[in-house]
């Protein structure tokens, strides 16, 4: 992922404006404007790092002459005491960018670490681990990137790049057949060619969705592993399959053993523990 694109730079500018406004008065009050210094990015626990390159862009945005001695890269395994990089430049930039840098890196590394943990629990299954749209508003593009750093895959990015007919869509539309038929007409009249996924709640709905033209993937929502296996026999490889709902560390291995195509877990982005990281002055 490039971190010098328009979206990322806009995020950095908005976040710094939120934090600094008319000035970092704590730093201004006691540090000369021209002061130079060095800070090290220090990891305090085991995990997968995500956000090294983003951190560098944040500090370089505040001080274009900031230099870096880099020791770790995004996707690397880290342990307590590891140093990601040493940044050398204006002390004002180092102090003013510290909180944004750490907030991002701690959360993104936490996501990458948890994703990697779950992927490891899936063993040699052919199933792919997916994220969801249960992300922090404004941070989705970064959080979904962190999932890929941890070895997972991205589901749809938003409401615009895939059609997912969930239970509420189906109920409001009047049933699976009607919802899919209307979706097919909508795509045709709007010259769209988006993948269509249908959420199902039981085997009868699986059979109904399977009989509809234009369905690319069937979501098996809150199915047990045994029910997943039964559904996979019915589907027989005719469309993609996704298990979702109620999948945790305790049972992900059982779901992965079914070899369902995809396993989606919202907790990858909505319930992770941030990795403990700090930015400290180099003596």
Image (cartoon, rainbow, N blue to C red):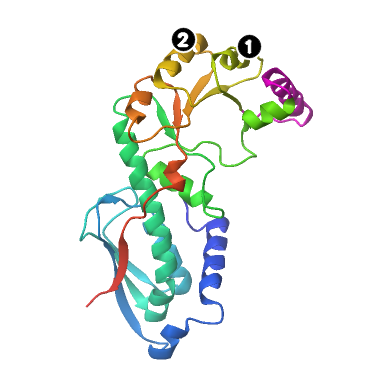
Q: Does 178 lie within the magenta span?
A: yes
Say whether residue 128 is visible: yes
Q: Which residue is at 62% across, 29% downward?
A: 167
Q: Does 50 lie within the magenta span?
A: no
Q: Position of residue 4 (x, y in %)?
A: 50, 58
Quadrant of the rendered structure where residue 153 is? top left
The residue that label 1 is drawn on is 211
The residue that label 2 is drawn on is 233
Q: Position of residue 119 (x, y in %)?
A: 34, 35
Q: Which residue is at 53% across, 13% downward?
A: 238
Kindly report the distance in space between the C-alpha atoms of the residues bearing marks 2 and 1: 15 Å
Left/right placement of residue 156 relative to residue 115 reads right
* Relative height, residue 191 to residue 39 (above, below): above
Q: Main secondary structure of the magenta part?
A: helix
* Relative height, residue 246 to residue 13 (above, below): above
Stretch of the chain drawn in magenta: 174-195
């Amino acid at each position: 992922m490039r971190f010098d694109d328009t979206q990322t730079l806009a995020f950095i500018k908005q976040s710094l404006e939120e934090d600094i406004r008319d000035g970092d008065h704590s730093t201004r009050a006691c540090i000369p404007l021209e002061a130079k210094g060095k800070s090290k990015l220090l990891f305090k626990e085991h995990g997968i790092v995500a956000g090294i390159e983003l951190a560098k862009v944040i500090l370089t945005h505040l001080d274009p002459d900031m230099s870096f001695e880099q020791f770790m890269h995004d996707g690397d395994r880290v342990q307590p005491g590891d140093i990601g990089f040493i940044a050398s430049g204006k002390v004002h930039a180092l102090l003013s960018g510290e909180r944004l840098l750490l907030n991002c890196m701690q959360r993104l590394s936490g996501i990458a670490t948890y994703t990697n943990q779950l992927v490891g629990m899936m063993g040699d299954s052919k199933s792919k681990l997916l994220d969801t749209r249960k992300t922090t508003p404004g941070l989705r593009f970064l959080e979904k990137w962190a999932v890929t750093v941890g070895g997972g895959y991205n589901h749809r990015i938003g409401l615009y790049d895939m059609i997912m007919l969930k239970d509420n869509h189906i109920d409001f539309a009047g049933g699976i057949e009607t919802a899919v038929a209307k979706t097919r007409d909508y795509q045709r009249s709007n010259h769209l060619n988006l993948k269509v996924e249908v959420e199902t709640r039981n085997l009868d709905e699986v059979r109904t969705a399977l009989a509809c033209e234009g369905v690319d993937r069937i979501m098996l929502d809150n199915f047990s592993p045994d029910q997943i296996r039964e559904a996979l026999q019915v589907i027989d490889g005719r469309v993609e399959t996704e298990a979702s709902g109620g999948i945790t560390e305790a049972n992900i291995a059982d779901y992965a053993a079914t070899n369902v195509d995809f396993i989606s877990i919202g907790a990858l982005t909505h319930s992770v523990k941030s990795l403990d990281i700090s930015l400290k002055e180099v003596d």
